[in-house]
Image: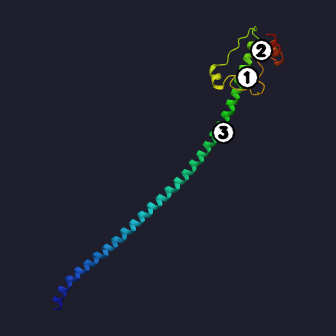
């Protein structure tokens, strides 16, 4: 009777044991799956943190580069303004010298005119005041003509004409 009693009771115990094993296996599997999921999430967070830091450094470098480009741009604009002012002075001086040479009239000298694109770009004498310049290099003209181009001689020539 003990054996008979053990058999009917053993079958439900075996079923209970299998259910208990399944439950334990499921819990173990769930724990492993949860751990794996946490590790995967932590790896994703670490990757995002590293990318955020890399982008922050890249952004700082770009800001520094943009600041340097702005500084260079401002310096070039300033240099361009200085060069344009100097070009205007030179154009005005050239127009003035050409005018003085034309006053000489009878002197056999081929005086080239100021190119139109320069006059359009920097203007003629009526568009700008003649700014004081550093003395230009001496013209490669004969001494007699250079003497005639002196301001006091030009005034005297102007009175004669």
Is residue 10 shown above or below 127? below
Give how far across and how far down residue 131 sits, in percent.
75, 28
Of residues 83 and 26, the one drawn nearer to the viewer in this rendering: 83
Say if mark 3 contacts mark 2, CB within 8 Å.
no
* Residue 117 found in image quarter: top right
Residue 83 location in percent, x, y?
68, 31
Q: Nearer the viewer, residue 118 or 72?
A: 118
For marks 3 and 2, the one nearer the N-term is: 3
Name the N-terminal-most of marks 2 and 1: 1
The residue wearing badge 3 is 75
**Horizontal and vertical percent position of residue 57:** 55, 53
Q: Residues within 10 Å of mark 1 (few under 14, many from 20)?
A: some
> Mark 1 or mark 3, which is nearer the start of the sequence?
3
Residue lying at 29% horizontally and 76% vertically, measured from the top left:
23
Left or right, residue 148 beside residue 18: right
Q: Residue at (74%, 18%) from the top-left corner?
A: 97
In the image, is residue 83 above or below residue 24? Answer: above
Would residue 28 appear left or right of 155 to someone viewing this image? left
Q: Residues at badges 2 and 1 in contact (C-beta under 8 Å)? A: no
Separation of residues labelled 3 and 2 (CA atoms): 39 Å
Residue at 44% across, 62% down: 43
Query: x, y (%) of residue 89?
Result: 72, 26
Q: Name the disc covering residue 93, or none.
A: 1
- Taking the spot 58% from the left edge, 45% from the top edge, the residue there is 66
Q: Nearer the viewer, residue 97 or 64?
A: 97
Between the residue at mark 3 and the residue at mark 1, the CA separation in whole angstroms equals 27 Å
How far apart are the two marked residues, 2 and 1, measured between alpha carbons? 17 Å
**In the image, which is nearer the foreground, mark 3 or mark 1?**
1
* Residue corresponding to mark 2: 141
* Above or below, 26 relative to 77: below
Mark 3 and mark 1 residues within 8 Å of each other at the beta carbon: no
């Amino acid at each position: 009777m003990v054996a008979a009693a053990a058999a009917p009771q053993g079958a439900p115990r075996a079923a209970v044991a299998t259910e208990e094993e399944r439950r334990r296996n499921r819990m173990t599997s769930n724990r492993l799956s949860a751990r794996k999921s946490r590790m995967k999430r932590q790896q994703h967070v670490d990757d995002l943190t590293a990318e955020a830091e890399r982008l922050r450094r890249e952004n700082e470098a770009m800001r520094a580069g943009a600041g340097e480009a702005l500084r260079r741009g401002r310096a070039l604009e300033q240099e361009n303004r200085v060069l344009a002012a100097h070009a205007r002075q030179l154009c005005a001086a050239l127009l003035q010298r050409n005018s003085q040479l034309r006053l000489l009239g009878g002197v056999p000298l081929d005086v080239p005119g100021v190119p139109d694109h320069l006059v359009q770009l920097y203007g003629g004498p009526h568009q700008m005041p003649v700014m004081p310049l550093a003395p230009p290099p001496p013209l490669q003209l004969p001494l007699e003509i250079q003497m005639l181009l002196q301001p006091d001689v030009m005034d005297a020539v102007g009175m004669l004409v």
